[in-house]
Every structure is written in C-alpha cells, then in structure tokens.
Amino acid sequence: MTQVIHQARQLRALGAGAGPVCVVMTMGALHRGHAALIEQARGQAGAGQVIVTDFVNPTQFGAGEDYARYPRTLEQDVVLATAAGADVVYAPDVADVYGFADPSALNSLITIDPGPIGSILEGAARPGHFAGVLTVVAKLLHLTAADIAIFGEKDYQQLSLITAMVNDLHFPVEVIGAPTVREDDGLAMSSRNRYLDPAQRAAAAVIPAALRAVQDSAGLGEHAALEAGRAVLDSQPDVELDYLTITAHDLGPAPASGAARVLIAARIGSTRLIDNMPVVLGA
C-alpha cells in the first residue's frame, strides 16, 4: 500500500530499499501522463523505492497566474500513484518545503539562477518561473535522497534546465526524460487541460497538428517548416500563439540541418498550453 506522508522528517525516516530511490515530481492533479512517469520509475527502481511528490509550488507562479485555482486532488492522486506503482506520496505544505508559510517571506529565499536558458521562451513569458522550478526541484532532490529523477519531455525547457543544474552542481542524481503522453487527438496531457471547456478543448487539437506540420516540412528548412506550422494555427482563430520556434536540442540556435526541437506556447481563453516535438531540419 502506498504510504502518504506530509513532512520531510517522515521522508528521512523511510527505510532504505534494496535498490535505488526514484522520484517523480508533480504538482498533483495527476493524469495518465503522470502514471506513465511513475510506471517508468517503477521499472527503474526495481526493488528500490518510488517516491511521488505532490506539491503545488508557489515560487514558480508569477503575479496573476493560476496558483490559487490550480487543481488540488490529493485523494485521487494517491489512487493513481498507487495503481502506477508508487511506494510513497510526499504531499507537503509550503512551510514543510520552505520553512515558512508566509507568501511574502518567499521573496527572501536563496534561489537557483537558471542562467541564460532560463530567460528565453517560457522564461521570457514567465519571469522568475525557472528560478522557482529549479529551487524546488533542488530541495525535493535533497529531501527524497533520490538516485534517479524522471521528468516528462512535455516541459522540455524545464527538463533541459534541471538536467543542466544536476550536471553543473554535481548532484548525485540521474535525470531521465520521458516521452510526452498524448490524447487520441494528439494534445499533450496536462493538468491545465481540465480548464478547457468542450469548444476550447476541440480547438486545442490544432497545437499538436501545427507541430506535426513543422515536422513534415522540416526537410525544407527552418523557415518553411515554421510557415507550415503557422498556417495550421491560422485555421483556428480561438488559439492565440505566444511562440512557435525551432531550436537546437539544447535550446540554442537551430542548426542549418540535423536534429532540432520545435516548441510552442499558445493561449486558449485564459489557459496557456505548451508542447514540443523533435524535428530533423534539411539543408
């Protein structure tokens, strides 16, 4: 039976397993995409422990973002995590993670600077977001004493920054990226999808369609591929594009040819969705 704990001292009291500790970090509102991460963690951990963190982290939300309304569904989360193979669900409050519950005190925290990659794409749209992400990930890696951490590729910039942080700061952790899990129409699974009404949900299918159009035209080069993606997006007026861009796999400038990544952010009503796919650019 999955053990649900709420305090860091309970994490420290966990007995060592016969294999590695594998952590899957979530903000709750778990869905099938999270289940795939937990199942992969179960396979990596073997006879070790799989810990799922369930924590809506306030430091990665900016002013006017959806921290207060972000779905919190712990009871259902535990059911899903249990079925997927979790041994422990760590669901702390803000005070247990940060040492105080006063939101204004969070501004005095020592945080991790994400560097230049943290200021582009999502970092440009959400200033301070990745400092909050890296800080809480660092805390949770220490608290869980993880040997392996699995993150989804859907949040590709986040995965890239966490991998860089672990490498640059010599964390004794292996970071593994897991493929994006998608709905039948291709939409990447996200906890924010539940904000969409039926008409918005139908419109959202244009996002993965645009990424596939970029993939299909990538052999013609970066410019033609992006034009193909924008043409698909233009067919759906309810989707407001923030960015559609192609980068190198490390988020640097796109190569003239070879492996690259296409990333998108778009808003449907008040809901902002992100996605990405690999592409291979032609000469």
Image: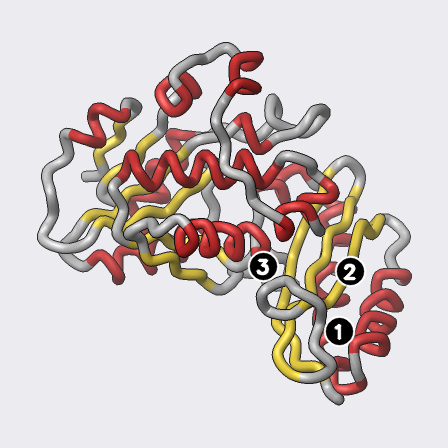
Badge 3 vs badge 1, beta-carbon distance below 8 Å: no
**Total numbered badges shown on the rendered structure:** 3
Q: Nearer the viewer, residue 77 or 17?
A: 17
Is residue 142 toward the left or the right of residue 194 in the image? Answer: left
Q: Amino acid at mark 2?
A: Leu
Question: Whole-percent x and y of residue 21?
Answer: 22, 49
Callout 2 secondary element:
strand
Q: Amino acid at mark 3?
A: Glu
- Counting residues from the start of the chain, the first of labels 3 and 1 encountered is 3
Determine if residue 219 is in view: yes
Q: Is residue 282 above or below residue 121?
A: below
Query: CA–CA distance between discs 2 and 3?
Result: 21 Å
Q: Which residue is mark 3?
A: 183
Q: Residue at x 60, y 22 (%)?
A: 68
Q: Mark 1 Cα within 10 Å, few/some/many (few <14, many 20+)? A: many
Q: Residue at x 61, y 25 (%)?
A: 69
Badge 1 vs badge 2, beta-carbon distance below 8 Å: yes
Q: Which residue is mark 1?
A: 214
Question: Whole-percent x and y of residue 226?
Answer: 82, 70
Q: Quadrant of residue 228?
A: bottom right
Q: Nearer the viewer, residue 48 or 259?
A: 259
